[in-house]
Amino acid sequence: MRITTVVFLVVVTLLTASAGAEVIRVVPLDLSDNAVFSCGDRCKFRGSLPTGPLRVRIIRGSVSELSAIASDRRYAAAGCIELYSTIVRPRRSRRTADLLDLKFYFNTRWLASGGSNGQFVFIVEHDSDPNGPAIEKTAMLRLPAGPRGAAYFRAGVDVAVRTPMNVPGRQGFLVKLFRSTAKASASMTTTRLAAESSPATEDTPLPAAMPRATSPANCVDLQIEQPPVIFRRADAVPRKRPVHVAVK
Amino acid sequence: MPDSVRRPVALTKLIDTFDRLFPDEQLSRLVVGRSGMADGMVAYSARSIENWTNIVNEAIRQNTLNDLAVAAADLQPNVPEIPRYLQEYSQWAAQQNVSAQGIAAALITQRAPGFLERARLVIVAWFGVAVGCFAFVGVLARESTHHLFDLPDSGFADAFTSPGESAAAGLRFVGRSLVVAATYFAYNPYGSVLVVILAGTVLYFAVRRRPLIERAYVPAVVLPIVVIGAIVKTLYYDLPVLGFTGVLTKLGIDARTFDPPAMFSARAEKIWSGVVCSRIANFPEARSLCGKATSVEHMQNLYGVYLLDVIFTIAICVLGIAALRKLTLPSHTRAWNLPRALNLALIVVIAVALLGALLPVPWTYARTVASMEYPYICTAECEFHIRVDANKTFAFYPADGEIGAAQAVPANAQVSMRDILDVAFTNQVKSPTFVPHDRGRRLGEN
């Protein structure tokens, strides 16, 4: 086969693939402060987000780490990276227009293995399927590698789930001493809660793994809007004495 | 000296002090014998206060009141009240320009000082302390509920400017505790009867075996019981749930949300699961937390925990207040008449122990059995209104899990009373639980 024929076939294949590619419209976010949550916090944000259905894509890792992966030459050579994500369709509050409520609470299972802080990237996208399930736990994402893929991750925000203060190894001597006696009953309760609150096969975090490089076929097309939306935790505002009105 | 002259306060206090130190007639005869008074002229009486009134009057007539005081101080050292009241009386007598016999002649016609005359100031002081404690407990009960909800402004500062509302909160606290006791009796009649029998036995033993109790009723025994009892009670019942806050806006159904210290975590989970499961035990999603027990069974355990807290607090307070009384007033038991510095130190220690035992109870109350019924206002969406004071009302929006300033209630709104924790916990237990999928492929997948 002649080289021109091969080039022609490749170009046709690429054009065919890109013509049917899904388009993801990303709402870039600019985090005004650290989005650090504790276990038990409700996942809510505030920001002047565009109207219309939105979805939030959650990926384990940090913005810098994921954008570095997207820029990695090994993935760029393949043309596309493939990774799993979780999609949550948030609720827009009737009462407060700028509130984006993801309706779930962070818990200890969001922490990384070894009891350290959990790191996640939250990316807001326009929702092409607003009637989809409230939570898609294993949504496949095939991003173009290189600068465009890196820009996608940089359009998201870092969210950390902070480890509770009282994890083993952080207590003082007296606490440890007491804990040695109270350990049996406490650990029984904790283990029971962790084991029974959800099936381990589904929700237990796996060790971090690298995304997979894949061919450009079915790679999504990205449209990143401008300008970025100022985004912050819903309850991160310094509390002021609210103005009250008379209530009958 | 005119007959209308009243007995001076200092003399009343001196008689009262002798009465407390030597309540037996035999002891009073011993003091009189040691003082060198002419014994034959004293009209002894089986009633202690009357006995000492007669002795003091006779000592004044014989001009041997100083000797009587010295003899008493020899037998009961560490009683600074005797020289103080004696000096105050002497100053009063010197101002009268009348002989000792004249004063005795005037006093002898007067009856022994009654209870009110002797204890007027003490009664006023104790009444003031009781009212103050009651109001402060009311403030704490209200404040602790607002802290439990993590309201932006709890109204703590305003509590002192509205004493009526604080007193009402105190009344609600006491009334609710009584209701809890009555309700628990219905839940667990056998256990309640057992507690009543136990309490009756202790009371009977205290009354009928008084000499035995008296021997053990010394500072070396009472002080450790009060202090250790207060510490243990507070550690076991109160401190585990002290850090629970923001239960409406956070995942309040999971005790780990509040990150209790390791030494309290098991206990905190146990108490808090009673609060949570008494609301949501019937939901299948709560099965892992609440087990197979019903809401009523969890409520029974919760009430039992709170009642035991109250019973132990009352027991510690009764013993502590009795000890404080012994330490602040002269006692016929020498062990209670301690040197001034030690006496003051023990008073401070017991007072701190009592405050430590008493003050956390309203906080525990708010986190266990307090009524959580609030106005539930529904229009397009529903919200609770939490009134802080006359000028401030907060709203809790269950759908958003948020608290904000309340707006005026619309005319078409449906208003009812609902348990705010019930609604909040139901929303929480129904919220999705998941962990984002790992970004890489699982092992074994292509």
Image (spheres, coloured by chain):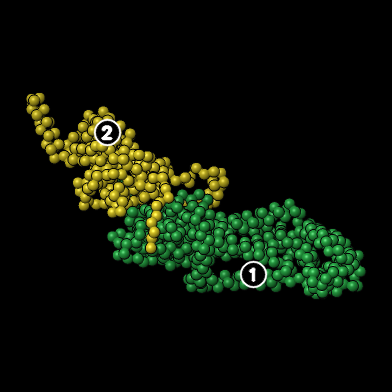
* Secondary structure beneath label 2: helix
Q: For the residue marked with disc 1, what is the amino acid?
A: Val
Q: Chain of mark 1?
A: B
Q: Residue at x 41, y 43 (%)?
A: A162
Q: Residue at x 86, y 63 (%)?
A: B97
Question: How many numbered tags mark residues here?
Answer: 2
Distance between the alpha carbons at the discs numbered 1 and 2: 76 Å
Is A173 or A87 nearer to us in this picture?
Answer: A87
Q: Is residue B340 left or right of residue B64?
A: left
Image quadrant assignment for residue A143: top left
What residue is shown with label 2? A150
Q: Quadrant of the C terminus of chain B?
A: top left
Is B394 or A118 nearer to us in this picture?
Answer: B394
Q: Is residue A117 left or right of residue A153?
A: right
- Tint applied to chain A in the drawing: yellow
Q: For the residue marked with disc 2, what is the amino acid?
A: Ala
Q: Is residue A24 left or right of residue B135?
A: left
Q: Which mark is residue A166?
A: none
Comparing labels 1 and 2, the label whose residue is closer to the camera: 2
Q: Is residue B51 something that shows in the picture?
A: no
Percent coordinates x, y for residue B439 in the rendering = 29, 41
Q: Chain of mark 2?
A: A
- Tint applied to chain B in the drawing: green
Percent coordinates x, y for residue B95 in the rendering = 83, 61
What residue is shown with label 1? B202
Image quadrant assignment for residue B389: bottom left
Q: Is residue B276 left or right of residue B93?
A: left
Q: Is residue B60 something that shows in the picture?
A: yes
Percent coordinates x, y for residue A32 in the rendering = 35, 39
